[in-house]
Image (cartoon, coloured by chain):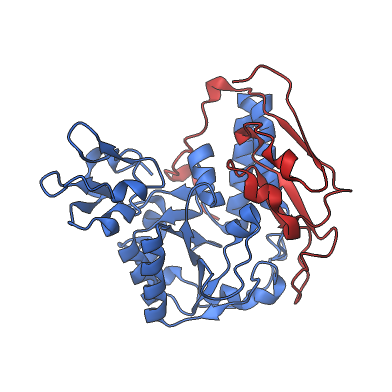
Amino acid sequence: MCIYCDLWGDGTVWYLNPKNYPRHMYTLPRPDATSKAAAGEADPAGFINAERALVDAMEKGAEEFEATLTALRDGMDMMQGSLGGWMGQAVPLRDAERMVEIASPKGFIACICRNHMLGLEERSSPQMTCMGLGVGMLKWERWPERYKGGVCWVSTEEAKEWLRDMDKRGFMHSLMMFGPRFIGGICNCDYPVCDALAMRIDFGFNMLKGHHVAMVDYDLCNGCGICAQRCQFGALKMNVTIDKANIDQMRCFGCGLCETACPRGAITLVERAKVPALQEVW
Amino acid sequence: MVDKSQLKVPKPTPVDLGKLPLKFPRIDIDYSKCTVPFWCKKCLQVCSQLVFQVYCKQFVRLRESDPREPGVYEVVAVRRDKCNMCNKCVEVCPEDAITITYEGVPR
């Protein structure tokens, strides 16, 4: 159970608890808000400047870097209601499918990371690689730049089919929270295009590992290597000596990309809580 | 607001602090030359390290920005720490707006 399960899980995995999806709409900006973001106004350069400051601080020294990182994480907590800057979590396909059963409304939107990193414009629904969950998207008119191409509202079945398609393409799924107890989207990420994933892998914050870890059954694995092309975390490699897949579970995020790709069912997702040394590895 | 000190918030697993400070290449972009980066985006596409990011400088209510309108978007060299100074962006830039300088000992 991760920290958000402890806080908001009510005895279950927090992102499968319907209480954590937004159904309430149009809260007024907080009168005590000190930043533009907290008042509901987005700062377009906010995160880019924070990332630049982080890189600049690495040139100054360890102390400066730690201070900048702490300031960034605190800023994220204030804006997004996260804790310690952990605003996302890896989710396997099966959990993502359960999430879209709970969340309503939901719609395809353009991915903001691919927009920033590659200048991609996902203007029509077949191109869109991000899914918004809940009523937050109905505030689109505040940030049309974020919702370029609009929002394509979809049914639960359409959302599931799309998730499976994304999984086939090799994207790992992650949830993003926007405000405390507010799961606002399912992203389909790959390193280094996804900014959240790049922050996690390069700077060690932003996206929590998932509630599972992948394990290989060596009796079933025939060393076809299909899974090895899919791991975004460098956790899964082929063990050349025995010609079978090998997973470094300390690095595994439990996204399940290898599990869904394995044609022989040799890879299974085990609950993190059941692996003693990995219970607190988030 | 939750009292963070009472919770077991996972610590970040940061970069190797013992190695800091590090020197990274300096990437300067001449914004008088680079005016429509979202329309051009050549540097974004050529960089294998994804050093650059492009963003819209302002959000306007009820209106999307036009990538062809000069000065609306800005390209920024965010992840200088990943730059390997291959100079492909400098070569591909149609406006010669990018310069990379590096002082110090390569890692």
Residue A134 image point, x, y percent = 51, 75
Q: Position of residue B94 (x, y in %)?
A: 79, 48
Q: Colour of chain B?
A: red
> Relative to B34, does residue B16 appear above or below in the rendering?
above
| Residue A73: x %, y % from top left | 58, 45
Chain coloured blue: which letter? Answer: A
Q: Relative to B62, is A197 above or below?
A: above
Between residue A133 and residue A226, name the one nearer to us.
A226
Question: Against A25, is B68 above or below?
Answer: above
Q: Is residue A50 left or right of residue A84?
A: right
Kindly give the residue lying farthest to the left in the view shown.
Answer: A219
Q: Residue at x 82, y 42 (%)?
A: B96
Residue drawn where x is 66% and y is 16% of the image: B105
- B99 to the left or right of A92: right
Relative to B67, is A81 on the left or the right? left
Please state which of residues B20 and A275 is positioned toward the viewer in this rendering: B20
Residue toward you, B11 or A203:
A203
Q: Which residue in the rendered view is the most extreme toward the right?
A: B32
The residue depicted at 42 percent of the width and 43 percent of the height is B8
Q: Residue at the top extreme?
A: B105
In the rendered view, would you say B101 is above or below A27?
above
| Spot occupied by residue A181 in the image (x, y as percentages of width and height) | 48, 64
Q: Residue A199's quadrant in the figure? A: top right
Image quadrant where one finds the C terminus of chain A: top left
Res. A154 in view:
yes
